[in-house]
Amino acid sequence: MVNKIWGTFIVVGLFYGFLTGRMDIMNQEIIDCGSSCLELFFHMFPMMILWSGIMKVAQEAQILSFLSKLLRPLFSLIFPELKKDDPALEYIASNLTINMLGIHNASTPFGLKAMKCLQEENPKKDTASKSMITFLVLNTSGVTLIATDILAVRSSMGASFPTDLLLVTVLATIINTTLALLMNAYLGRRGS
C-alpha cells in the first residue's frame, strides 16, 4: 500500500512538473537533494555508531537489565499479561531506554527481539497479542526525552540553539504516550 502511495506522489509530481514546464527545476532539486541526503548521512552515521556501541556496552554490563528491573513496576501496569521475569521485558526496557535517548535506529534490534519473544508466547500466532499491540503503541507514540537524532540534524544544519526543542520533546512525549496508552486500554477493553 505504501509503495502505491509513494508511486502516486512521484507520478503526480512528475506530471505536474511537466505541465508547468519546471522539469529543469525538478532535475536540479533531485541532484541537490541527493547530495544533501548524503551529507546528512555522514553527520548522523557516526552518532548512530557511537550510541549503538554504548548500548551494546550497557547491555553487556547488565545496565539495561538493571533498568528493566527498575521499570518492572511500571511494566506490570502497562503489560499485565506478562510475567515479572519475562525475557521480553528486558528487550522492551532496552528499546524504550534507547528511544528515550532519541536514538531510534539503534533501538530497532531490541524492538525486534522483544516482538519475537512476545510472538513465541502468543497462543494465536496469526493475531497480535495485547502485549504486542501495547508495545507497538508505545513505540509509535514517540517515547523520546532527549532527541539525539534531531539535535544532530539541527547541529549539522547550523542551528544557533539545537537544544531549544528539548522541553517541547519531553512535553510531546508525555502527552503522546499517555494518550496512546489510554486509547490502547480503552480499545483493548472494548475488543475483549
Image: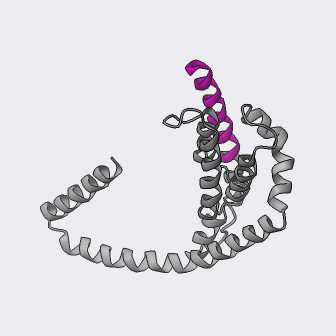
Above or below residue 97? Residue 58 is below
Q: Is residue 10 in view from this perspective?
A: yes
Q: Is residue 135 in view from this perspective?
A: no
Q: Nearer the viewer, residue 135 or 39?
A: 135
Q: Position of residue 31 (x, y in %)?
A: 32, 78
For the rendered model, the colour scheme is one colour
Above or below residue 78? Residue 188 is above
Q: Position of residue 99 (x, y in %)?
A: 67, 56
Count of numbered tags: 0
- Left or right relative to 57: residue 109: left
Q: Nearer the viewer, residue 188 or 127?
A: 127
Q: Position of residue 20 (x, y in %)?
A: 15, 62
Q: Position of residue 64 (x, y in %)?
A: 80, 59
* Residue span colored magenta: 173-192
Q: Which residue is depicted at the point 82% across and 46% down?
A: 71
Q: Which residue is depicted at the point 38% across and 76% down?
A: 34
- Left or right relative to 109: residue 127: left
Q: Which residue is depicted at the point 19% across and 70% down?
A: 23
Q: Nearer the viewer, residue 38 or 72?
A: 72
Q: Is residue 188 magenta?
A: yes
Most common secondary structure along the magenta stretch: helix
Q: Nearer the viewer, residue 85 or 51?
A: 85
Q: Quadrant of the C terminus?
A: top right
Q: Is residue 44 magenta?
A: no
Q: Which residue is depicted at the point 72% across and 35% down?
A: 79
Above or below residue 186? Residue 127 is below
Q: In which quadrant of the rendered view does residue 107 lie?
A: bottom right
